[in-house]
Amino acid sequence: MQVAAFLKNLFDLSGKTAVVIGGTGEVCGAMAVGLARAGAEVVLGGRIAEKADKRLAEIESHGGKGYFVPVDVTSRESLHELLDTVLKRSGKVDILINGAGINVPTPFLEITEEEYQRIMDTNLSAVFRACQVFGQYFVDECQPASIINVGSISGLSPLSRVFTYSASKAAVHNLSRNLAREWADNDIRVNTLVPGFFPAEQDRKVLDESRLLDILRQTPTSRFGNTEELIGATLLLASSAAGSFITGTELVVDGGFESMSI
C-alpha cells in the first residue's frame, strides 16, 4: 500500500480539469482517457461530437468524468468560447493539451498556397492561438498550469513527403520552448510531447506499404506504438508533483526511431 500511495501522490490528478484540443482523435483521445483515469475531469475539444462519444463512453467506463465542447482551432473566437464554456461548467482549467493536426503527402513542388496555409493554420497557428487564449487566463488568474503541445518526430528530423507538416511541427517545438521560458515565473510549464509513429488516422492516410517498411526498419522496437503507450508520458508532464520541474522539454516516445541512423 505504501507503493500505491507514493505513486498516487506523484500522478494523482483528482480535482484537476484538463482541456484536450484534438481529444476526439486517436492519439489525443488515448491521452484524454489516461488523464481521466488519473482523476482529472477531461474536456474533449474537437469538431465532431460523434467521435467524442466513443472516448467519453470509455472515460465513463473507468469511472472518469468528461464532456465534449465543439471548437474550431482556426478561430480565436471559438477558442475563447471553449475556455468560457469550461470555466462555466468546471470552474477552472489546470491542464491544456494542444493536439489538433492535419497531414498531406503532397510532393513539395505541388504544394499549393492554400494547402500550405491550411496545414500551418491547423498545426501551428492553432497552437499559438490556444496558448494565447488559455495562457492569458492562467496569467491573469495566477493559475499554475501544465501546457502540453503535441509535436512530432518530424519536428526533430524532417521527414520526406510531409514537408509542410514537418515544418509546422518544428515550429511548435520552438514555440513551446519559448513559452516555457516566458512563463516559468508564473508556474506555467510548457512541454512538447513528441510521438513517433502511431496508428493515427492521418498516418494511415499518408503511409503506403513501402513507407511502412522503411519506418519499421529504422525503429529499433520494429513496430508502431500503441496509443496507450503515450499515457505515462502525458501523466508525467501533466502532474504538478511528478513533473513540477519539467518545462521546456521535448519528451520523445518513438520506440527508438530518432536514435537510429544507417
Image (spheres, rainbow, N blue to C red):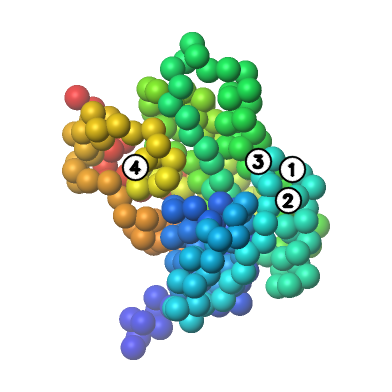
* Amino acid found under the numbered disc labelled 3: Ala
Q: Residue furthest bottom?
A: 1
Left or right of 43 on screen, residue 133:
right
Element class at badge 1: loop
Identify the element where label 4 is drawn. Answer: loop
Splitting the image into 4 quarters, where does residue 229 fall? bottom left
Residue receiving disc 2: 79
Residue indicated by mark 1: 75
Residue 136 position in % (x across, y down):
77, 51
Where disc 2 sits, the SS reads helix
Q: Is residue 241 left or right of residue 215?
A: right
Q: CA distance from mark 2 to mark 4?
A: 28 Å
Residue type of the residue flagged with mark 4? Phe
> In this figure, which residue is indicated by the disc labeled 3?
126
Residue 2, numbered label: none
> Residue drawn 48% across and 59% down?
29
Assess whether mark 1 and mark 4 are in contact (beta carbons under 8 angstroms): no
The answer to whether the residues at label 2 and label 4 have Cβ atoms under 8 Å apart is: no
Tell me which amino acid carries mark 2: Leu
Quarter of the image with the C terminus is top left
Q: Could you tell me if the residues under marks 4 and 3 are in contact, i.e. CB atoms within 8 Å?
A: no
Q: CA distance from mark 4 to mark 3?
A: 22 Å
**Vertical side of 169 occupied by 246: above or below:** below
Residue 116 is at least partly visible in this image: yes
- The residue that disc 4 covers is 197
- Residue 186 figure quarter: bottom right
Front residue of this view, candidates 252 and 223: 223
Tell which residue pokes out farthest to the front in this image. Answer: 50
- Name the residue: 40% across, 23% down: 161
Kindly report the distance in space between the C-alpha atoms of the residues bearing marks 1 and 3: 8 Å
Q: Amino acid at mark 1?
A: Ser
